[in-house]
Image: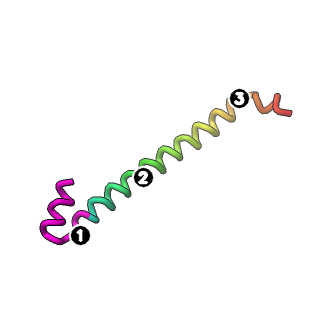
Amino acid sequence: MEALKQAQIKDNYESFIELVADYEQDELDKRIDLLTRIEKERKFAQSQTRLDKFDK
């Protein structure tokens, strides 16, 4: 919030926008990593189970 306050005082939002963009990029990277791990674990679990034999 301090960055936003300073941007408003100086009427220069460039640094605030960069801060938000960096935060958003970091969050997106974390989300992609999480989804990648979930997919790997799902594939591993699928290869370890015999439940598909009872599906039919």
Q: Secondary structure at mark 2?
A: helix
Quadrant assignment, res 45: top right
Quadrant assignment, res 54: top right
Q: Which residue is mark 1?
A: 14
Q: Earlier in the sequence, mark 1 or mark 3?
A: 1
Asked if residue 13 is positioned above or below residue 41 in the image, the reply reads below
**Around disc 1, counting alpha carbons within 10 Å, would you say few (fewer than 14), some (14 to 19), or many (20 or more)?**
few
Q: CA distance from mark 1 to mark 3?
A: 52 Å
Q: CA distance from mark 3 to mark 2?
A: 30 Å
Q: Earlier in the sequence, mark 3 or mark 2?
A: 2
Q: Nearer the viewer, residue 1 or 25?
A: 1
Asked if residue 45 is positioned above or below residue 3 in the image, the reply reads above
**Main SS class of the magenta portion in the image:** helix
Q: Amino acid at mark 3?
A: Thr
Q: Residue furthest right?
A: 56
Quadrant of the snapshot with the C terminus: top right
Q: Position of residue 31 (x, y in %)?
A: 46, 48
Q: Earlier in the sequence, mark 1 or mark 2?
A: 1
Question: Residue at the location (17% across, 71% down)?
Answer: 11
Q: Which residue is mark 2?
A: 29
Q: Which residue is mark 3?
A: 49
Q: Secondary structure at mark 1?
A: helix
Asked if residue 52 is positioned above or below residue 32 in the image, the reply reads above
Q: Nearer the viewer, mark 1 or mark 2?
A: 1
- Magenta highlight on residue 15: yes
Quadrant of the snapshot with the N terminus: bottom left
Q: Which residues are magenta?
A: 1-16
